[in-house]
Amino acid sequence: MHIIETKNISKLYKQADQDIIALNNVSISFEKGEFTAIVGPSGSGKTTFLNCIGGLDSPTSGKVMIEDKEITGLSSNELIDFRLRNIGFVFQSYNLIPVLTAKENVEFIMLMQGLSESHRNKRSIELLNSVGLEAQLNRRPNQLSGGQQQRVAVARALASKPKFVLADEPTANLDSSSTANLLDIMSRLNKKEKTTFIFSTHDQRVIDRANRIITLEDGKVLSDKKIN
């Protein structure tokens, strides 16, 4: 069974008097454990595609299937709950809550899921240790470097044990050292825990680590290559 499958999804936006086609009849499937980079020029549809498979946006037509569930037909509240329990997100801008510590940011998803305090405590410490931040548990985002904040964001994305993680340009604001560190962590989690990662990226350093590269152009799949 595919972990994700899109069936002929298209996304149109209205701009003044014309339709802008962000995605044009895209059908792609993903298996568990992939480390996939979605590439293409700005405006090719990368972020729109990620938003559609992550339930942050709905395609104008077509279907998005997560395992055996069609998410395109869910209500807003059902989508919120589905995302909370099934999908991890890592954004370019980190999106950490400024008043919470690193540990509290990671715990927040689990708190929303209604998990016990002891479970939240154990899992958040475990995850922050795994991304090398055991000494920064009680620091707030403004006390962390950009690379450290992005590692907190990765730990938070994994807190709910998601079916897959979507990362939208996660290295765009990071220097070479922080990028290599972050990719090492993600690659290790991918191999050790079979966590599925799907990236939208321009970054060659991310592309070089991927085991599959999908190229989008003008909202269409230009190529889809698996790397041995």
Image (cartoon, rainbow, N blue to C red):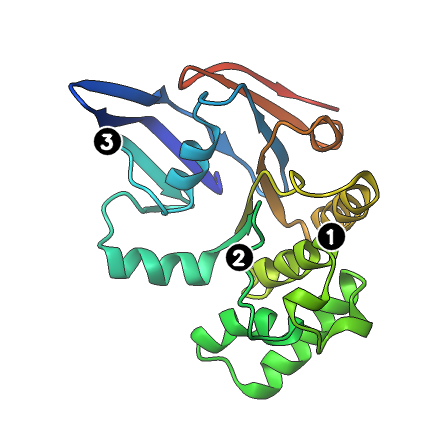
Mark 2, residue position: 95
Q: Earlier in the sequence, mark 3 or mark 2?
A: 3
At label 1, which amino acid type do we have? Answer: Gly
* Secondary structure category for the residue under label 3: loop
Residue contact between numbered discs 1 and 3, judged by CB atoms under 8 Å: no
Q: Position of residue 109 (x, y in %)?
A: 50, 69
Query: Counting other residues with Cα less than 10 Å from the Cα at mark 2, is it few (<14), some (14-19), or many (20 or more)?
Result: some
Q: Earlier in the sequence, mark 2 or mark 1?
A: 2
Residue contact between numbered discs 2 and 1, judged by CB atoms under 8 Å: no
Query: Toward the viewer: 93 or 161?
Result: 93
Mark 1, residue position: 147
At label 3, which amino acid type do we have? Answer: Thr
Q: Position of residue 114 (x, y in %)?
A: 44, 79
Q: CA distance from mark 1 to mark 3?
A: 36 Å
Query: Toward the viewer: 24 or 22?
Result: 22
* Secondary structure category for the residue under label 2: loop
Q: Residue at x 64, y 82 (%)?
A: 121
Give the quadrant of residue 124. bottom right
Q: CA distance from mark 3 to mark 2?
A: 27 Å
Q: Position of residue 88 (x, y in %)?
A: 53, 54
* Numbered label attached to residue 60: 3
Q: Residue at x 66, y 42 (%)?
A: 173
Q: Earlier in the sequence, mark 1 or mark 3?
A: 3
At label 2, which amino acid type do we have? Answer: Asn
Looking at this rendering, what residue extends furthest in the front direction? Answer: 142
Looking at this rendering, what residue extends furthest in the top direction? Answer: 222
Query: Counting other residues with Cα less than 10 Å from the Cα at mark 3, is it few (<14), some (14-19), or many (20 or more)?
Result: some
Query: Counting other residues with Cα less than 10 Å from the Cα at mark 1, is it few (<14), some (14-19), or many (20 or more)?
Result: many
Q: Position of residue 86 (x, y in %)?
A: 46, 57
Q: Residue at x 81, y 38 (%)?
A: 176
